[in-house]
Image (tube, rainbow, N blue to C red):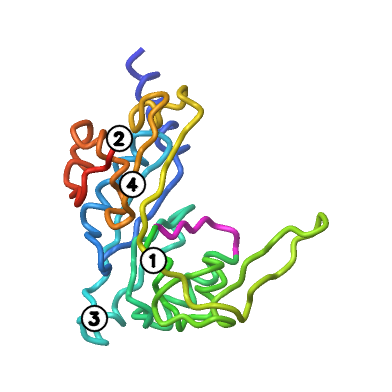
């Protein structure tokens, strides 16, 4: 019986998706975000997760030249890396990563990772539409819109790089009280008045429920 349990455990470990989280540079608190992402993936019991932390943003060229993650070990890379637009990865790492993605392995850029590497053409193709990082209209992706049953490129040379836009208050409603996240965030029938300066004020009701989310700062209490 004990032997069977051990064998089943080994098979289970081998069947898990091998994921690599890349962090080390970001204008946000990447350490806390990495902790949250890793915990979320592990909680599903479907992933085996490693973390590779890059050199710091002010690291020397020699330090960056030595940073070469072994992407071949993994089935998906989750990035919370944001260099602000000017690519810090060395040419070899970039080439290996491009090959990794072209071969059909997964890549998930999280939040501000869409701001990174504005001057790396292939990276912009991977993330489709980036924002910030000195991106310009016509060089960093475009929007696809469905017109007459066909997807067409739109707005390629129009507008500025992605951004938050003007701050304003807005209402958020939900009509599906059966979804777990909505039951936690907003009781059935509530309408929440939010101020976009906080980004996450809708999480107000979750702050006492999660050790990670409890670190978020609510700048303005919403009017209910």
Q: Position of residue 76 (x, y in %)?
A: 47, 54
Name which residue lies at 24% across and 77% down.
57
Identify the mark nearer the N-term, 3 or 4.
3
Q: Position of residue 99 (x, y in %)?
A: 55, 70
Element carrying mark 1: loop
**170 to the left or right of 222:** right
Identify the mark nearer the N-term, 1 or 4.
1
Residue 224, labelled with which disc? Answer: 2
Identify the mark nearer the N-term, 1 or 2.
1
Query: Where does label 3 land, which residue?
Result: 63
User: How far, Cα to Cα, is label 3 from label 4?
Assistant: 44 Å
Residue 68, labelled with which disc? Answer: none
For the record, the magenta segment spans: 103-110
Query: Where does label 4 land, which residue?
Result: 194
User: How far, Cα to Cα, is label 1 from label 2?
Assistant: 22 Å
Residue 211 occupies which quadrant of the picture?
Answer: top left
Is disc 1 in contact with disc 2, using a CB cutoff of under 8 Å?
A: no
């Amino acid at each position: 019986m004990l032997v069977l349990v051990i064998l089943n455990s080994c098979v289970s470990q081998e069947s898990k998706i091998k994921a690599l989280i890349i962090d080390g540079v970001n204008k946000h608190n990447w350490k806390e975000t990495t902790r949250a992402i890793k915990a979320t993936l592990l909680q599903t019991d479907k992933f085996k997760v490693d973390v590779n932390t890059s050199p710091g943003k002010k690291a020397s060229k020699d330090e960056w030249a030595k940073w070469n993650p072994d992407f071949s070990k993994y089935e998906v890379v989750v990035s919370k890396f944001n260099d602000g637009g000017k690519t810090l990865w060395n040419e070899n790492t970039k080439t290996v990563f491009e090959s990794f993605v072209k071969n059909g392995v997964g890549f998930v850029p999280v939040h501000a990772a869409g701001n990174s590497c504005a001057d790396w053409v292939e990276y912009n193709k991977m993330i489709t539409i980036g924002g910030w990082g000195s991106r310009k209209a016509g060089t960093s992706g475009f929007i696809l819109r469905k017109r007459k049953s066909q997807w067409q490129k739109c707005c390629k040379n129009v507008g500025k790089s992605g951004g938050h836009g003007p701050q304003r208050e807005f209402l958020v409603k939900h009509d599906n009280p059966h979804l777990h996240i909505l039951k936690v965030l907003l009781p059935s029938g509530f309408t929440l008045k939010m101020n976009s300066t906080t980004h996450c004020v809708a999480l107000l009701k979750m702050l006492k429920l999660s050790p990670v989310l409890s670190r978020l700062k609510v700048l303005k209490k919403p009017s209910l």
